[in-house]
Image (tube, helix red, strand yellow):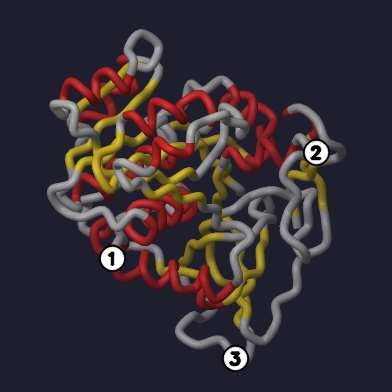
Amino acid sequence: MRAAVITEPGGPGVFRVQEVDDPKAGPEDVLVDVKASALNRADLLQREGKYPAPPGVQTEIPGLEFSGVVIEAGERVLGVAKGDKVFGLLPGGGYASRVVTHHRMVMPMPANMDFVQAAAIPEVFFTAYDALFNHCELIMGESVLIHAIGSGVGTAALQLAHHAGAYVYGTAGSADKLAKAAELGLDVGINYKDQDFAEIIREKTNRTGVNVVLDMIGEPYWERNLASMSLKGRLVLVGLMGGDKVQTSLGALMPKRLRIHGTTLRARPLEEKIAITQQITKNVLPMIADGRIVPVVDRDFPLEQVTQAHEYMESNANFGKIILSID
């Protein structure tokens, strides 16, 4: 099979698209002919040697999601057959023309979408759904602040929160991204380059704060996140793009009885990933199938242009997902 291989830790230019051995399917696995994968921030860290794959997963081929066609099913596979169009989450290896995954980790592709759209769903919708509803227990009538609203996770979380009946605030670095987010249901957009989100939240909420904060920035936003939270507010960290070291007063958590969550998906046990797959299949796929929620795709690169795709992600210009198409 063909794969985009990290030849050594470094910048986007370390990738080489080359022939590698096909993965082997076990009795409960499916072998998938991959049509598309997608970029995630974790891929950039893995390329730099800063985010190794979990034990048993090859580090030299990144990629946390896929869409494609089943070409082989193990003898104990149930509910999935050769020829099925599927998509799903991976612990790695998605930048390749074939992947193997447990059959309970795949989802059927809705009839209203193509492979590029399907590949834009798994990592960001799994992350956003788990963060908002499993960790923070967001409910109708509450308010949520979503940072990096134009990112893949941001656009997924925005739509999920909006359709759950929450009031959504979001930050981004351009008026264009905020305008696009408004079309997806954003109620209040905040340009972090010329506005202080904590001041906007304080003003818009009459000093009461928001119920939930979804953050992927980390250190630069820590104090302002705490200041923006309501009584019994919940903060969930899904990334640390701005750094992971903070010096703070723990006493700030106590008067408002705040809850702080941290979460990742990649290293979780298979059973937990299967459980989230079932949640997405039951609660999110119907909304995608009828068009209430849409996977947001910014650009589609062929696998051979993986270097350019990583350079584009590093520019922070994208609104939504960056896809790798595999012919």
Dot 1, crowdedness within 10 Å: few (<14), some or many (≥20)? few
On the picture, is 17 further left or further right than 310? Answer: right
Q: Label 2 sits on what residue type?
A: Arg
Which residue is under mark 1? Answer: 283
Dot 3: what SS?
loop
Q: Label 1 sits on what residue type?
A: Asn
Can residue 295 be seen from the camera position used here?
no
Which residue is under mark 3? Answer: 76
Indicate the position of residue 76 as horizontal and vertical percent values. Answer: 59, 91
Q: CA distance from mark 2 to mark 3?
A: 35 Å
Dot 1: what SS?
helix
Going 66% across and 32% down the picture, which residue do you hit?
Answer: 305
Mark 1 or mark 2: which comes first in sequence? 2
Q: Label 3 sits on what residue type?
A: Arg
Can residue 210 be seen from the camera position used here?
yes
* Residue mark closest to the camera, 1 vs 3: 1
Q: State yes or no: discs 2 and 3 in contact (Cβ < 8 Å).
A: no
Which residue is under mark 2? Answer: 16
